[in-house]
Each structure stands twice: as C-alpha cells, then as structure tokens.
Image (cartoon, grey):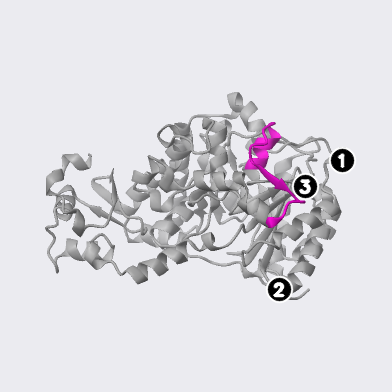
C-alpha cells in the first residue's frame, strides 16, 4: 500500500508535520523521521495525521507528539543534543586502525578476502620501522579512543612486530591518555601458551573465524596440517576458561568468532548456531559472502543470491529466538545492532550502518608495505589490483590523510542524504553505506541503491525486524531489549597514562 492510496495531496497540512518517510510493514504503515523516531499507524490514522486532524488528549495525538512527528511538539534544544550524542563520531577522527602484519598464512580458505602468500614469504611482513610510523599516525587522530586491530594473512606469523606495536603503543599512550585497546584477528593455528600468556597479560581481545560444524568449517577453511575446526574450537575453549580463571564475567568475556556464510551452509542455519553455542559463544554475527579477494573467484561454487541469504538469515534468527525462549541466551549481532538503533536510540558506531560511512573517518587499513587505505575493504580491493581506495602511506601526515581529495570523495559518497533512494527511505535514520562495496559491485562510489544487493540485504532485514517488533509479545520484546543492552568490555582497555 502506498501513501497515495490513503492521502489526498491537497488535504495535507504540511506546516503541522515533521518531515517523515513511510513504508507498509505487516498490516500497518511504519513512519520514521530523521530524529530516529518511529511509529506504526493504520491507514486511517495516517490520513488523520497528515490532514492535521489529530486531537490533543487522544491516543494518536499523544503518540505523535511523543515521537516528534508533530512540529509543535519538537523541543529543538533537546533533539539537537540527542542528535549530537548519536552522531558524536562526526566530531573526531578514525577509531579503528587495522594493521596487516603479514600476507603470510597457513590456511587456504576458499573465500579469503586478503592477498595471502605462502608461509615462506617473509618479505611480505610489516617491518618495525613501518609499524612505528603507522602507530605514530594512529596517535595523531583526534578520537579520544582508538583500537589497533591486528590482521593478516595470519598476524601471529609476525609475532615480533605484533609485540613491538603493543609495547610501542602503550608507551605512546602514557602521554596521549587515549582509551586504547588491541584486537587480534587470528585463525589460532600458531597460538601457543607463551603467546597466549602475553596476549592475556596485555589485554588483547581475540577474534577468530568459525564457519559451523567440523565438516562445514574444514571443507571451506582448508588447513593441510590437520582439522582447522578442532584446532580453533580447542583454543576457544581454553581461552574462555582462562578468562573465567581471571575472574572475568563469562557472559561478557570470551573469544569472539565470526562465520562467513557460503553456499554449503545455506540449509544448515541450525548447525551453525548450535556450533557457536556449543563452544561457549553468546553471539553470532551472520555475514554474507563479500565480493572481495578469493570470494569473487570462488563465487560459482560458494556464492548464492541475496534471496538465498535472506532465507538463511531469517531461519537462523527465528531459531535463535526460539532458543532464547527456552532459556539459552544468544543473540544475532546484526539484528542487535539494528535494534539498538531503533529501540534503544543508541548509535553502536558499526561502520557499515552509519552515515557518513566508516571509510577514512571511521577506520583506516595499514598494509605491510606502509600503504594506507580507506578501510579493510579498501585494502581488499587493492589486493585485487585496484588502488582506488589508497589514501596515502605511513609517510603522509594525518592532516593529508583526512583532507585529501580521495577522503573527501569517499565521505561525501557515504552520506545517505546524498542518495536519491536513501533520502526517501523509512530506514534512513538507522542505515548506512559502504562505498567500497558500491564500487566493487556497481562501479560507482555512490552506487544505485534500488539495484544494490547491499541495500536489499539491509532493507529486507529491517523489514523482518520491524515486522517482528510490531507483533512482538512481552517475551520477545524482553529478548530484543536484552540484545540492545550495551555492556562495555572495560577489561580490554589499556590503563590511561601508565605502562
């Protein structure tokens, strides 16, 4: 159903309304405004609203006033402060800095997004000199908090430089006093007790990949020296136990893991979720296969349509909801991010769902040779032979990186208000873009949202979640509210101003 089916244009009382977008969801219209408020209304209620016929004291009028849909009810100062809180990332520079320590890797993952080489290729390792210059740039950011994320290849293959970055950064932060944290993305194949002791002592958060049960994981994430699944789940359990032994809350502190959904996984949503629960995870982030690196070349065997992914996703989330109703607390992280924006009025600063997008001003990617890219995805594009997203190198100044033509173009392209389709979308207050994805799939930084699978994915998930919210009973709403509860992992923050 469209607005034109309900409203006569000549009867609209525009001066009484706050600009809004609308979408038919379930059996009612969903309306939203740029402040991030939403309301479900029937066709008759929508007609009454836009024709300015609401009556103070009646339920509809009071709902519209409370949700900032009536111009007379908007407190400009309060809403400006609210906007600033949710857009605080606009007032400082990038927070996430992805350091690719090496291109070496001992896995042969069929969908690998990185440009990996054999373990003998030590010439692809980041040097200590390059690492220090990169850290110097990190500490020039105006952001009060920064995360240095170690990536590869397999970053543990360049252990000496990883340790040096941690110690050098801690020394820098003794003066800078930023909220500093470290994250390691690893397949855990090179982990040993000595490395683990160091990482735990230095409060480095650990993240790995787990694609499901052993037969599925090992088929996709090929490890010639044995079972990758056995190795990674063994270390996950061991590390999680170490967190417990340290007195940390096991509901919060555990190894984070991410699955990449490939064609063989599409019918196995239950197996994927059960694997995560079995290994102690309380969150699953269901990620679609991206069009970067080896994944682009293996699409004929591993790829699938967006409709296929959405079917998988909805089945998985429905299963997760049922598990929660039965007493097993587990969330789907993508849904939790969206619901945090919608229900909790929070901005989780998830870089793929914000406007402007995360390119350059939310994150930067540092290659082993010192080249700097707009993001991790920008580096993936470079690994495919296209330097479109290179914004400088470790010899550049921070001001150059933040003000050059490439950065400005990427920021402008990542603004929803500049998109013909996004500007009229009901989900605009909670959505965002990734310019690198637009470029790789559509040949344009801005893309064409009505033809974009990126847009289709997010709009479809929003539709699904909003339909669930509209009909949710108290039990389901309690689950959603639990998913949106923000719990900070303070243990992983380095002590400010001290070594």
Q: Which residues are magenta?
A: 378-398
Is 392 in the magenta?
Answer: yes
Task: Name the secondary structure under disc 1.
Answer: helix
Task: Name the secondary structure under disc 3.
Answer: loop
Q: Residue at image x 33%, y 68%?
A: 76
Label 2 – label 3 distance at C-alpha: 28 Å
Residue labelled with disc 3: 370
123 to 51, vertically: above or below: above
Tell me if label 3 and label 1 are in contact, CB under 8 Å. no
Q: Earlier in the sequence, mark 2 or mark 1?
A: 1
Label 3 – label 1 distance at C-alpha: 13 Å
Q: Position of residue 280 (x, y in %)?
A: 61, 56
Q: Earlier in the sequence, mark 2 or mark 3?
A: 3
Q: What is the total number of numbered labels drawn onto the structure image?
A: 3
* Mark 1 crowdedness (10 Å alpha carbons): few <14, some 14-19, many ≥20: few
Q: Which mark is residue 495?
A: 2
Q: Residue furthest top?
A: 300
Q: Position of residue 408 (x, y in %)?
A: 56, 48
Residue labelled with disc 1: 123
Q: Position of residue 52 (x, y in %)?
A: 14, 57
Task: Give the number of the mark in front: 2 or 3.
Answer: 3
Task: Name the secondary structure under disc 2.
Answer: loop
Which quarter of the figure has residue 63?
Answer: bottom left
């Amino acid at each position: 159903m469209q607005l034109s089916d309900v409203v006569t244009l000549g009867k609209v009382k525009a001066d009484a309304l706050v600009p809004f977008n609308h979408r038919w969801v379930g059996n009612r219209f969903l309306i939203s405004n740029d402040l991030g408020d939403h309301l479900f209304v029937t066709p008759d209620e929508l007609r009454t609203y836009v024709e300015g016929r609401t009556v103070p004291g009646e339920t509809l009028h009071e709902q519209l006033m409370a949700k900032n849909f009536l111009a007379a009810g908007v407190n400009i100062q309060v809403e400006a402060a609210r906007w600033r809180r949710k857009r605080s990332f606009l007032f400082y520079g990038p927070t996430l800095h992805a350091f690719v320590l090496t291109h070496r890797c001992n896995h042969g993952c069929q969908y690998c997004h990185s440009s990996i080489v054999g373990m003998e290729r030590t010439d692809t390792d980041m040097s200590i000199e390059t690492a220090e210059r990169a850290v110097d740039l990190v500490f020039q950011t105006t952001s009060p908090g920064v995360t240095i994320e170690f990536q590869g290849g397999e970053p543990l293959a360049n252990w000496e430089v990883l340790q040096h970055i941690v110690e050098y950064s801690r020394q820098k932060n003794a003066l800078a006093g930023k909220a500093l944290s470290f994250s390691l993305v690893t397949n855990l194949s090179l982990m040993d007790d000595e490395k683990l002791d160091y990482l735990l002592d230095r409060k480095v958060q650990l993240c790995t990949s787990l694609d499901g049960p052993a037969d599925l994981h090992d088929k996709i994430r090929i490890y010639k020296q044995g079972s990758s699944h056995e190795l990674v789940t063994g270390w996950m359990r061991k590390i999680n136990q170490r967190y417990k032994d340290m007195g940390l809350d096991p509901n919060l502190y555990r190894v984070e893991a991410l699955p990449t959904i490939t064609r063989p996984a599409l019918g196995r949503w239950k197996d994927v979720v059960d694997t995560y629960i079995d290994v102690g995870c309380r969150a699953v982030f269901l990620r679609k296969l991206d069009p970067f690196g080896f994944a682009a070349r293996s699409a004929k065997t591993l790829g699938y349509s967006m409709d296929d992914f959405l079917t998988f996703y909805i089945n998985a989330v429905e299963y997760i909801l049922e598990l929660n109703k039965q007493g097993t607390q587990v969330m789907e992280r993508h849904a939790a991010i969206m619901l945090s924006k919608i229900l909790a009025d929070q901005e989780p600063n998830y870089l793929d769902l914000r406007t402007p997008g995360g390119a350059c001003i939310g994150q930067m990617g540092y290659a082993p040779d010192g080249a700097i890219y707009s993001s991790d995805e920008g580096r993936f594009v470079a690994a495919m032979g296209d330097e479109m997203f290179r914004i400088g190198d470790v010899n550049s100044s921070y001001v150059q990186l933040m003000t050059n033509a490439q950065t400005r173009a990427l920021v402008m392209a990542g603004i929803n208000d500049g998109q013909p389709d996004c500007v009229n979308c009901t989900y605009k207050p909670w959505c965002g873009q990734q310019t690198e994805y637009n470029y790789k799939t559509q040949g344009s930084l801005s893309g064409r949202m009505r033809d974009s699978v990126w847009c289709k994915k997010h709009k479809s998930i929003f539709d699904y979640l909003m339909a669930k919210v509209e009909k949710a009973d108290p039990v389901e709403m309690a689950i959603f509210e639990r998913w949106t509860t923000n719990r900070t992992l303070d243990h992983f923050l380095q002590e400010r101003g001290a070594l």
